[in-house]
């Protein structure tokens, strides 16, 4: 699928559940309110994209570029964000139950603070 086809599906309110978009450049897109349940977004360029109120339950964002993404009020239950670049991302009001975050590269306190206050996440660049 092309970026335009994906944007068209989102604008029509169509589901993107279980879609496989691994490695696609989706930077700067608005996925606000989209159903991305169990979507495969591993290795995607999602920089500056927004996911406000989106359902990302069981989604894989493994090794995705999520710099400056907005996950505010998103449902991220059991989502996999391991090895993702979350520099500058926000999670205000997001549900992060059983979410996998990049261990050792982002402090749990950073994620909790972002969920509570909407502050941007800062990653530890010294650890891989």
Image: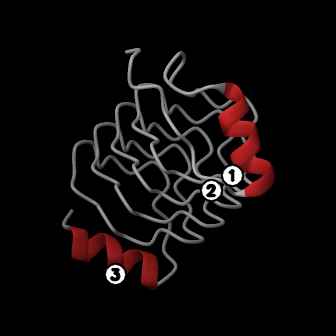
Badge 3 crowding class, 10 Å Cα cut-off, few under 14, some 14 to 19, many 20 or more, is few
- Residue contact between numbered discs 3 and 2, judged by CB atoms under 8 Å: no
Task: Please determine whether, in this image, residue 33 is positioned above or below residue 125.
Answer: below
Identify the secondary structure beneath mark 3. Answer: helix
Lower sequence index among marks 3 and 1:
3
Task: Please determine whether, in this image, residue 68 is positioned above or below residue 105.
Answer: below
Task: State the CA–CA distance, disc 3 to disc 1.
Answer: 22 Å
Residue 74 percent coordinates (x, y): 66, 57
Lower sequence index among marks 3 and 2:
3
Task: Please determine whether, in this image, residue 115 is positioned above or below residue 112.
Answer: below
Residue 51 percent coordinates (x, y): 54, 63
- Residue contact between numbered discs 2 and 1, judged by CB atoms under 8 Å: yes
Name which residue lies at 60% across and 71% down.
33
Residue 105, label in figure:
none
Task: Please determine whether, in this image, residue 64 is positioned above or below residue 47.
Answer: above
Residue 36 percent coordinates (x, y): 52, 55
Lower sequence index among marks 2 and 1:
2
Identify the secondary structure beneath mark 2. Answer: loop
Residue 55, label in figure:
2
Residue 13 percent coordinates (x, y): 52, 79
Residue for badge 3: 8
Badge 2 crowding class, 10 Å Cα cut-off, few under 14, some 14 to 19, many 20 or more, is many
Name which residue lies at 39% across and 37% down.
85
- Residue contact between numbered discs 3 and 1, judged by CB atoms under 8 Å: no
Name which residue lies at 34% across and 81% down.
8
Tally of marks: 3
Residue 75, label in figure:
1
Q: Is residue 89 left or right of residue 128?
A: right
Name the quadrant of the C terminus.
top left
Q: Residue furthest bottom?
A: 12
Viewer-proximal residue, 47 or 24? 47
């Amino acid at each position: 699928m092309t970026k335009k086809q994906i944007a068209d599906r989102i604008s029509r309110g169509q589901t993107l559940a279980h879609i496989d978009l691994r490695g696609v450049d989706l930077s700067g897109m608005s996925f606000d309110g989209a159903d991305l349940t169990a979507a495969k977004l591993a290795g995607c360029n999602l920089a500056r994209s927004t996911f406000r109120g989106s359902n990302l339950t069981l989604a894989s964002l493994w090794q995705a570029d999520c710099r400056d993404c907005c996950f505010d009020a998103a449902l991220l239950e059991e989502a996999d964000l391991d090895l993702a670049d979350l520099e500058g991302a926000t999670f205000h009001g997001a549900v992060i139950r059983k979410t996998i975050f990049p261990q050792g590269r982002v402090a749990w306190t950073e994620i909790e603070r972002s969920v509570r206050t909407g502050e941007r996440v800062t990653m530890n660049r010294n650890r891989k």
